[in-house]
Image (cartoon, rainbow, N blue to C red):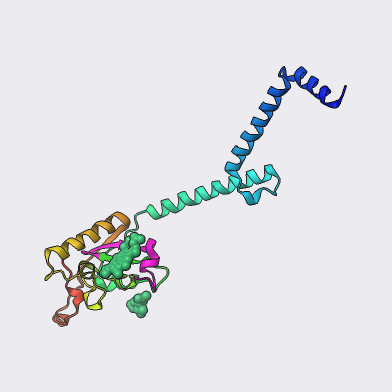
Amino acid sequence: MGIYSAAVEEITWYTGLSPAAFFTIAALMVVVYKTVSSMFVSPEDFNKPPVAMSIEKISQSNSDFLNNVMATTTNSQPLQLGDMTEQQLRAYNGSDPNKPLLISIKGQIYDVSSSRMFYGPGGAYSMFTGKEASRALALLSFKPQDINGNLEDLGPEELQVLEDWEDKFTEKYAKVGQLVREPMPADQAGCGDETHEIEN
Ligand code: HEM
Ligand SMILES: *[C@@H]1O[C@H](CO)[C@@H](O)[C@H](O)[C@H]1NC(C)=O
């Protein structure tokens, strides 16, 4: 009696299965194990011992998950900066890395920090950061003299363009405050600064 037939006899004795059924089930179990464990283990971990890699991977994805939950919770705390003047808004133009990036549209201030590549220093639209940008957005203009809140002479189509921008920002970014007029002492009246032209 060879080793093979001895093994077959043992298998049949212990499991009550025919050798073909036994090997099929064993193969399926291997496939299931590989499939399930590959859900937890990335390929570069395959040279580590299986138990250690699974536990390490699972606890890592747990802490990733927790970090994400915490980041989401922290970010979704609606940051409220409240009312500020255009002058105060300028502090949020990206020059201070500890401050959020803010843009005002129609006097509503949005936190655009999540689009740092657009609005951060060197970003394509950084000229709007820390500013009331309504006029520039309505006119699709990057001219410094258009980066303000003066809508007085704009036509209905331009106002519609502005409204579309407003919708986009309302949907994408958190509102964190509102622009208020600069306190305007009598001795500053008529200084011609466009920062006094905000409409609400
Ligand atoms: C040649 C003209 C332009 C091209 C090719 C262009 C291209 C783009 C592209 C590819 C994006 C990214 C869109 C996204 O991933 O969500 C974008 C975003 C933006 N564009 Fe332009 N753009 C142009 C002109 C303008 C003008 C004239 C303005 C306003 C004065 C403007 C304002 C913006 C703003 C504010 C965003 C960012 C919106 C956000 O925060 O998601 N763009 N543009
Ligand atoms: C932001 O504003 C400050 C002055 O308030 C200015 O010195 C700085 O260059 C501005 N930074 C950017 C990135 O525009």
Q: Position of residue 55 (x, y in %)?
A: 63, 44
Whether 109 is among the magenta residues is: yes
Front in this rendered view, residue 56 or 183 = 56
Query: Is 62 positioned to the left or the right of 91 in the image?
Result: right
Whether 53 is among the magenta residues is: no
Q: Position of residue 73 (x, y in %)?
A: 42, 51
Query: Is 60 positioned to the left or the right of 157 in the image?
Result: right
146, above or below 78, in the image: below
Q: Quadrant of the C terminus?
A: bottom left
Query: Is 93 positioned to the left or the right of 44 in the image?
Result: left
**Identity of the residue drawn at 70% across and 23% down:** 20
**Which corner quadrant of the image does residue 110 belong to?**
bottom left
**Identity of the residue drawn at 27% across and 56% down:** 170
User: What's drawn in magenta, residue-wise?
Assistant: 105-124
Furthest toward the right, the residue is 1
85, above or below 22, in the image: below
Confirm whether residue 200 shows in the render.
Answer: no
Q: Position of residue 60 (x, y in %)?
A: 58, 49
User: Which quadrant contains ligand 2?
Assistant: bottom left
119, above or below 10, in the image: below
Confirm whether residue 47 shows in the render.
Answer: yes
Front in this rendered view, residue 38 or 62 = 38
Q: Position of residue 136 (x, y in %)?
A: 23, 70
Q: Quadrant of the N terminus?
A: top right
